[in-house]
Image: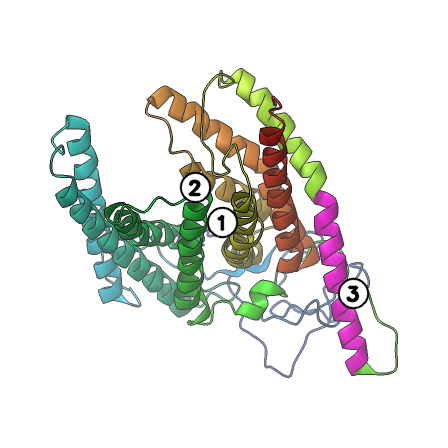
Amino acid sequence: MSADPPHGDVGEAPSDPPAQPAPPSDVVSPGYGSPGYAPGAWSYPPPGFGPWTAWSYAPAPWGYPYPGSFESPGRFHPVVAPRPINSLQGRAAPRMYAAGWLLSLAGLGILVALIAAGIAGVTRGVELLIAGIAETACVALTAGLTTAAAAQGSQRRADGWQDYSGPSPFLVTGAWLALTTAASLPLIGLVGYLNLRLATPVQTLLLLLVNVAGYLGLVQLLVVRPGALSWREMARPKHLAPDPNDLPAPVYEGADPIQGARTQSLRALGGDALLGLALSSPFLIATLFLAGILTNLLGMRDVQSSGPIPAHLHGWDLWITLLAAAVVAPIGEEIFFRGFATNAWARSLRRDSALIRAAIFFAAVHIIDVTSFDDLSIFVRAAILAFVVRIPVAWALSWIYTRRHSIFASATLHAAYNGSLVLLVWWVGTNNTSW
């Protein structure tokens, strides 16, 4: 945890324009660049942005500070004096802040001690005790990071953040990692204790379901419940920083407004699905091409690895893997990484900066899939490979989400990409074909 910077995740200089007060709910200023425009209210659509539809955007109480550029309203975070990280003075929720610090440090300290003990070889013969201590540490870390995230959201609301007043996606992700680890350890222990021999696809599906529960629970608790974002806003984001290259939804021309809205919604969903499907194959090909190059450069061609998708799939294993990879994983990850994280950053950053951050973040989190190597050198190379090959599709998912203003577009791309990859692995394994 660190002290709250003047502009949070954005990191802009304190010289940026101060926050503008929200206009009355019944007042909407003229569009940006038009006569009578006044900073402090952002009305849609800005001139030159194309044939926007009614549902695509809504007025927001943010200013548009820099004429001639597409800067986001995230620059309107209020300028506050930096708070010392070890001080409770000026905190909106000092008790939560202190509790978050103490619990997080305690959990992290225990985990570091366990890792050091494992390296020293003093954990042999006391595996059950070590597992209990590890579970306690994960629970403490989960409680600490969750409390810290709640305190950060309270602080941002007290400071008057108008674009996104919830906790940082980085902090919430730390809480998710600790939570899912705390939930997975007993599940894995129970399976081992009962001597259940679950197929790899079944294990993967169960762990993914735990992940999805963690995603949804934390987003509901830390983001939706305090009012930073709503589920509807995550599905159809209306308050992203504008970009001149956004893809407009089809406009319905008809006499019946209700039928027009339904037709427009169906056309929008159809456009989302078609664009996602169309992009899945090019990005899968790009990923495989990049993976082939990096595998040779990193000397990983002859290294046997076990990724999240088993090399040989037969019968029900194929269908369970497809369910896990093409349905369960996209649902949880799109809600968390696009609906929550990308949405939050795209409200507070310029569009290109938000996409780069979201892509790197998504790819970095997936390094946790690399778990099957004991050799440190091979592990590092495998982690680099896992990170870099995910950058193209990670960028594409955030790009289509912000361009279409639709989580259905990114979810379709995600599902088609993962499903195609599973089928490709199945085909290669069935035909004994070399990559």
Residue 194 visible, this orientation: yes
User: In terms of secondary structure, where does tag 2 sit?
Assistant: helix
Residue under label 2: 200
Near-viewer residue (263 or 353): 263
Please give the name of the residue rendered at 67% of the width and 55% of the height, measured from the top-left corner.
Answer: 409
Amino acid type shown at disc 3: Arg
Q: Give the label, 1 or 3, closer to the camera.
A: 3
429 within the magenta span: no
Residues marked 1 and 3 touching at CB (< 8 Å): no
Left or right of 112 on screen, residue 295: right
Residue under label 1: 12
278 within the magenta span: yes
Span colored in magenta:
258-279
Magenta: main secondary structure equals helix
- The quadrant of the rendering that contains the C terminus is top right
Near-viewer residue (431 or 347): 431
Q: Position of residue 398 (x, y in %)?
A: 61, 49
Left or right of 34 on screen, residue 152: left
Spatial separation of the CA atoms under disc 2 and disc 1: 46 Å
Residue under label 3: 267
Amino acid type shown at disc 2: Thr
